[in-house]
Structures are given as C-alpha cells and as structure tokens.
Amino acid sequence: MDDVTEPKIGDARPVPRRIMLDRLRHWFPLALLIVLCVGFGLSSERFLTVNNGLIVLQQSAVLLVAALAMTFIVMSGSIDLSVGSMVAITALAASALSATLGIWAILPAIAVGVVCGAVNGAFFAYGKIPSFIVTLGTLVIFRGIVLLYTGGAPVSITDRDFLGFYSGRSFGVPNTVLIALAATVVAAVILNHTVFGREVRAIGGGERVALLSGINVNRVKFWIFVLAGALCGLAGLLQSARTMAATAQLAQGLELDVIAAVVVGGTPLTGGVGRIRGTVLGVLIIAILSNGMNMTGVDPYLQNIVKGLVLITAVFLTIDRSKILIIK
C-alpha cells in the first residue's frame, strides 16, 4: 500500500496524487469550456455564430486584461480585491483627459494604475499588512475617489479620435480585443521568459525558500502589484472606450469575475503554479457563461449564484491541499 500515495524515504518517484492534481488543473478549463459551448449551442441557435463570437471576445477584453494582473498576484500567493476600483479610477482618468489627449489618454490611465498598484504594493510588501486587508481598504478608497470626483454623474467621452481608435475595428476584429491580445502576449513573455516571472513563481511556491535563495522578496512583491496596477489601467481605458464614459459604479463587482477566471483557468489560490493560457481559457469560460445565460434567459440574480458555484467547484478541484495553511 505504500506505493499508492506515500513514497518511501529516498524514493524519487512523483506522488500519484500530485500527478492527478496537475492533470486535473491542466485539463479542467478546456473540458469546462467545451461543455459550456456544447450546452449553450444546443440551447440557442444564435450562440454558435460568428457575430456572437465577436461579442463574446469584445466582452472578454476588459476581463482578460484585469485577469492577467490578478494572475501574477495569485501566483505569488497573494490576492487583490481592489481590481474593480482600480479599473474605475483609471477609466475616470482616461475619460477626463480624453478631450485633451485623444488616444494618448492611455498614458494617464496607466500612470494612475501604476500609482494605485504602488500604494497596494508598498503597504503589503514593506508595511507587512496582508494583501487581503490592504486591497480591501484600497477598494473602498479608490471607489471613494471616483465618487468624490464625479459626484455620481458620468464623465462622458466625446473625442472622436479616442472613440474611433479604441472603439473601432481592424480587419473586422474590435480594437479592444487586439489590444487585450497584445497585453496577453507581453504578460506571457514576462511570466515565462524573464527572471521576474521565475521569481514570482518562486515566491508563490515557497516564500522562505525564495528568500534563502537570494530573491529580494519584498521588491518582487512590490513590483507585482505595480505591474497589476498598470494592467488595470489598460483595462480601465478599454472599459471607458466600451461604455464611452466613466461612471461611479463602473466595474463594481469585477473582482468576482476576475478571481473566478484566474482560478477556473488553473491558477490555485495557494500560488506557485499557473499559466497565462489557463487564464485566457478561464476568461473565455466566464464570458461564455455570462453570454450563454443571458441568451437563454437565465435570471440575472441566478447568474451570480452560478458564477459563485463555478468558482467554488474550481477551487475544490484544483487547490493543493498540502499548502492549505499558507493561503493568504
């Protein structure tokens, strides 16, 4: 019986339970995506159409960029609850300055995101406050700044260059989708082909071991949140272009969809493991789930329950219980 789950001392063979977990984490997103596509395709003849496919991609753009940000954070073993508020405040920056800067409103949007990410990172990495607490506080603070500035009124975008570029299409594909795909490629390169990406994985896999191996853990943690802030700035810009305005309630509740997309995509909350392509699959799953439920007439309140159940199921199936004590 020793060869089933517990190898003998000195036995170099991998634990079968670990192998099964890795395979489940790897194939679960793709299997769930196929099930959803088949199910909704049979429920509605309009679902499996090119037009609806483009709609799903357009709806996925903001979620994808924000989920890329969350992927780095979750892989490091932390969490960020302020993603929706950061998207709102950066969308406000883009909307307020679009008339002056046109398409270059992307610069203040990303700059504001970087500042917000730096605030989160500084309190977390150097202030030694748990990421959950820090981002719970800044979730309220950033949203409060948006409410204070707008007074509850929308800030509309009227600049034609801005709307023409960010809301237009190239080769029949929405520009927001192309920008999101470009961000995905950059994020994949950073994660898979840079020292920083390896350090993120190392910290998520074991912070003490990473520290002993010479990694400046505090510095890496800080820059993870700065990078996440920059990506949220881009997401805010895309969201403002999509709605042609920034509102006080913009991206409220986005945190649930972002965390769900990352976890469903195979990045466990225990950190150390994850893939950008898994996050892409997770985003498509959440977007298709919302699109399909809307198309088949599922009650909007019931949709939130379904998303919550999908998140819990994904965590239950993919979490590494050997690291359960280090969840932050």
Image: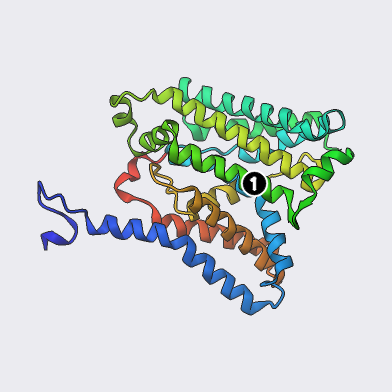
Q: Is residue 250 above or below residue 35?
A: above
Image x and y of residue 63, in percent: 63, 49
Q: Is residue 216 above or below residue 11?
A: above
Residue holding disc 1: 180
Image x and y of residue 119, in percent: 58, 24
State whether residue 253 appears in this view: no
Decide: few, some or many residues near mark 1? Use Cα within 10 Å; few <14, some 14-19, many ≥20: many
State whether residue 316 appears in this view: yes
Q: In the figure, residue 194 lies in which quadrant?
A: top left
Question: What residue appears at the point 32 percent right and 50 percent down from the top-left corner?
Answer: 321
Looking at the image, residue 230 sits to the left or right of residue 206; the answer is: right
Amino acid found under the numbered disc labelled 1: Ala
Looking at the image, residue 10 sits to the left or right of residue 202; the answer is: left
Report the front residue among 249 and 3. 3
Report the front residue among 214 and 296. 214
Image x and y of residue 157, in percent: 86, 39
Looking at the image, residue 14 sits to the left or right of residue 279; the answer is: left
Q: Is residue 52 above or below residue 6?
A: below
Question: What residue appears at the point 38 percent right and 33 percent down from the top-left corner?
Answer: 203
Q: In the figure, residue 216 lies in which quadrant?
A: top left
SS at mark 1? helix
